[in-house]
Image (cartoon, rainbow, N blue to C red):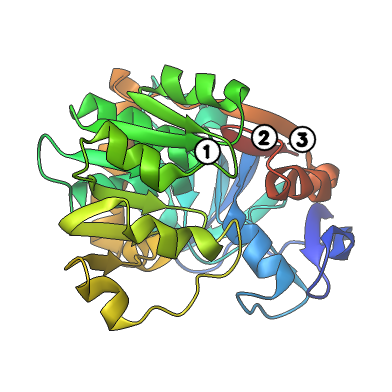
Amino acid sequence: MIRSIELVAPGGVDQLQLTRRPLPPPGDGELRVRHHAAGVNFIDVYYRTGLYPLPLPGVLGVEGAGVVEAVGTGVEDVAVGDRIAYAGAPLGGYAEVRNLPATRATKLPDGVDTRLAAGAMLRGLTVQMLLRGPRPPAPGSTLLVHAAAGGLGQLLTRWAARLDLTVIGTASSEAKARVAREAGAAHVIIGRDADFVAQTLDLTDGRGVDVAYDGLGGAYLRKTFDAVTPFGMVVNVGQAAGAAPPVLVTDLSKRALALWRPSVMAYVADVPRYRSAAADLLGALERGDLTVEIGGSYALEDAGKAQADLEAGRTTGSLLLIP
């Protein structure tokens, strides 16, 4: 019997329940992985609350890492005993063991810790998409990164700093501002109610940033438009502060802005692109070009607490469930 956390109905964290069920052998093209850790992300919250629909009951979790215990027919590139990490669909990370399509499995280099990889895959692939994907910022650009001390914000700031991009971060407290500075932010605007538009314009001599990365959504998204230089770009990558509001074309045309709302799940759905992006990410981790802070580790049965802490903004860095 395999322990897992099932979502039984949309709603609060009380809808996450510990269950024990048998796990069938891996099928054709599948492998069985025993998790050393699984990541906890805001997308899990979106599934839990019903913002993103999911057949129920279902096991949440879109990233994890561990050791291969068995392989099904047709699996040639992965063997029993290999350390692997993964991100993307199908869901199922909140479990001690799961079956996984072999196309999702990425072998871990010797220099990358298994648990570290579990907390780096989804956010790391998101950052790889943002900085190296279809709309990369130009060399020398100045970026605005909301929630720069969070799991995604830290990774984005660290990788951007390595690429010699200037980061202006926002943070809700001085403690989180210190985390953002340590990640490489050149400037940090502090306070949930801070006038980040005015301060960003002041820091850029009235010009605005070239690209703004908004992982908050809600009222922050429209305000962010005014912090970007004409012909710049706003990227919405999350809804931690509420659903992104409707945007009129005229909201953008006033400053000739581009608005990009990419989906990392769609980005990694393409297997060749996923493998290339994962190799880029894991290579950066192995070389030490990119570091990941594990902000908290929780027992599998405490998945609800992990999500509650994430929602409340009580955490920094990546969060892990340890089976």
Dot 3: within a 10 Å radius of its alpha carbon, few (fewer than 14), some, or many (20 or more) residues? some
Residue 277: x and y in percent read: 27, 48
Residue at (60% x, 32% y) in the render: 316
Q: Is residue 159 left or right of residue 145?
A: left
Residue 151's disc is 1
Residue 193: x and y in percent read: 59, 45
Give the position of the N terminus as an image quadrant. bottom right
Looking at the image, is 183 positioned above or below residue 146?
Answer: above
Give the position of the C terminus as an image quadrant. top right
Residue 315's disc is 2
Residue 298's disc is 3
Query: Hey, which quadrant is residue 310 in on the image?
Result: top right
Q: Earlier in the sequence, mark 2 or mark 3?
A: 3
Residue furthest left as drawn: 139
Dot 2: within a 10 Å radius of its alpha carbon, few (fewer than 14), some, or many (20 or more) residues? some
Q: Earlier in the sequence, mark 3 or mark 1?
A: 1
- Real-space CA distance between mark 3 and mark 1, rounded to the nearest whole angstrom: 16 Å
Residue 142: x and y in percent read: 22, 38
The answer to which of 145 and 24 lies nearer the viewer is 145
Identify residue type, mark 1. Gly
Query: Hey, which quadrant is residue 58 in on the image?
Result: bottom right
The answer to which of 40 and 55 lies nearer the viewer is 40
The answer to which of 75 and 51 lies nearer the viewer is 51
Looking at the image, is 314 positioned above or below residue 87?
Answer: above
Query: Hey, which quadrant is residue 284 in on the image?
Result: top left
